[in-house]
Amino acid sequence: MSAIDTLWEYLAVAVGILVILGGLTFGLLRGRAGRTKDLPAPPSGQPSTTSPTSQEANDSPTTAPSRAPVDTLPPPAESTEVTEETLPPPPSRPTVETPDAPAGRLQRLRARLARSNSALGKGLLALLSRGQLDEEAWEEVEDTLLAADLGVQATTELVDKLRTRVKIENTTDEASVRRWLHEDLLALVDPSMDRSVANSRIEGRPAVVLVVGVNGTGKTTTVGKLARVLVAEDKDVVLGAADTFRAAAADQLQTWGERVGVPTIRSDREGADPAAVAFDAVKAGAELEADVVVIDTAGRLHNKVGLMDELGKVKRVIEKQSPVDEVLLVLDATTGQNGLRQAEVFGQVVDVTGIVLTKLDGTAKGGIVVAVQRQLGVPVKLVGLGEGPDDLAPFDPEAFVSAILD
């Protein structure tokens, strides 16, 4: 083969190679241009989805913004602005009541007392002012006094005094008899007794009042009404719901407290240790710098030794941190002489310092006031004269006797 033929062969190979390279280059360029054309243009305000610049690539990964694909960006969040229309209504607050002032409550309720004790007052006046008083008449006087639960000893004393006066004065006119009865009954009720209830701080601590009694005397209600008496006297009060055996007792007491803005210390567990609840109530009263802590206890029969021992325990546990300044025994005035036995047993267990007589407006047995004072040697301090929230009144001997006789 000649040199010319060889040269043409090389040229043909070279041209073929150039044609092939040119075709490949054209195909690559066309494919790249096609892919670039298919990409959507970035929307206004959105970051570009093309490759980052060298400056972006050098940014710290902790500060580089996260870029989501255009078609997966979340929709804009709805406005969370709270308007007045969307605000829930404020919770309703219990209305705090203003109790009636204790002063004068007994006078205000004298009409009720006079009606209920007509057998004692009007009956005696009718007997004593009817003229000649023979032995039979004096026996009727004694029967009337005994029926009013005055007690045998007090009845004997009163009749003896009246017989002496009638004999000396030689008269039985109604005005004189009324005056003598008033004087002698008032002496039996004994206005010299201290009837104040512990209601103020003592040596930098709250006064502690323990309320006790048998079932059915209205004890929890009496504690609630006593709270109203104390609030009306502008005292800061804490209630202790130590009646943990009756399911509704703590709720009932708390409702009484809320009505006058008084806190109630209670256990959420039914059957909790009443001594522990009483202890916590006294502790809370000290922390709140209250004037007085009033503790309600479960009603118990006076002849149940175990229950009475438990009541003694409540008092002892309280005394580990504070003296008990007042023990009020709640008695139902309609129980008569049976209430005297109750008073005696409670007095032995917890040293009763005062009596609260409930339902006195529904009985003609006003003489129980004298009888129970003589039985325990402690005064009647409060009397319940109705079902209203402010129908618990401090006992006033003068107003009581006047209501009976007038």
Image (cartoon, grey):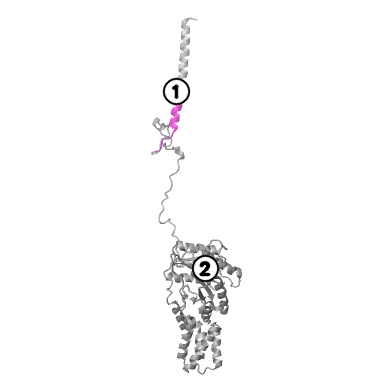
How many numbered tags mark residues here?
Answer: 2
Q: Nearer the viewer, residue 83 or 210?
A: 210
Q: At which x and y percent is residue 337?
A: 57, 79
Q: CA distance from mark 2 to mark 1?
A: 102 Å
In this rendering, the label closer to the viewer, 2 or 1: 2
> Mark 1 = which residue?
26
Q: Quadrant of residue 143?
A: bottom right
| Tag 2 and tag 1, C-beta contact below 8 Å | no
Q: Is residue 303 above or below residue 38?
A: below
Q: Please indicate, yes or no, whether residue 123 appears anywhere in the rendered image.
A: no
Q: At which x and y percent is residue 188?
A: 49, 82
Is residue 249 magenta-colored? Answer: no
> Mark 2 = which residue?
296
Provide the residue span drawn in magenta. 25-43
Which residue lies at the image location 45% right of the left edge and 30% below the top edge?
35
Q: Secondary structure at mark 2?
A: strand
Q: Residue 41 vs residue 308: left or right?
A: left
